Image: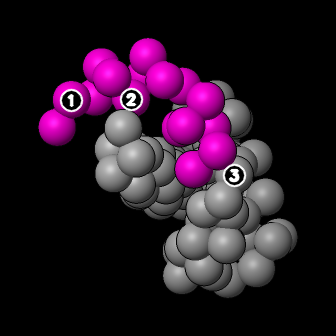
């Protein structure tokens, strides 16, 4: 796979990312219960670790970061693989 060619033709990657929104939505339904759960994970992702520890949410914060990282990694990986089919 030539990923450099994908990033040189970034417009294909953007189009694939836009067309793949239903796939991202289905993945999001698998990872998160509802929109509020997704927004809570985003809040915990941007919240500093020391504040999570003070609030007693440190373990929940770590789990939220792992889930978001895996979710975003799968979404980005999907876009790269599908865009590679068109380059």
Left-right relation of 49 to 86 = right
Residue at image mark 3: 18
- From the top left corner, tell me how far across and down residue 18 is, in percent: 69, 51
Could you give the CA–CA distance between mark 2 and mark 3, rounded to whole angstroms?
Answer: 15 Å
What residue does disc 1 label?
Answer: 2
Q: Which residues are magenta?
A: 1-16
Picture quarter containing residue 46?
Answer: top right
- Asked whether the viewer can see residue 62, the reply is no
Residue sitting at the far left: 1
Residue 46 visible (yes or no): yes
Indicate whether 8 appears above or below 83. above
Residue placed under numbered mark 2 in the picture:
6
Q: Residue at x 63, y 38 (%)?
A: 14
Q: CA distance from mark 2 to mark 1?
A: 7 Å
How packed mark 3 is, by other alpha carbons closer than 10 Å (few <14, some 14-19, many 20 or more), is few
* Crowd rating for badge 1 (residues with CA inside 10 Å; few <14, some 14–19, many 20+): few
Give the residue drawn at x 43%, y 22%. Answer: 7
In terms of sequence position, does the residue under pointer 1 or pointer 3 come before the other? 1
39 with respect to 33 (left or right): right
Q: Residue furthest right?
A: 36
């Amino acid at each position: 796979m030539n990923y450099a060619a994908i990033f040189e033709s970034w417009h294909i990657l953007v189009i694939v990312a836009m067309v793949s929104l239903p796939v991202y939505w289905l993945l999001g339904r698998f990872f998160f219960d509802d929109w509020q759960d997704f927004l809570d994970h985003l809040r915990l992702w941007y919240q500093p670790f020391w504040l999570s520890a003070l609030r007693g949410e440190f373990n929940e914060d770590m789990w939220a970061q792992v889930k978001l990282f895996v979710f975003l990694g799968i979404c980005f990986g999907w876009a790269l693989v599908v865009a590679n089919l068109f380059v």
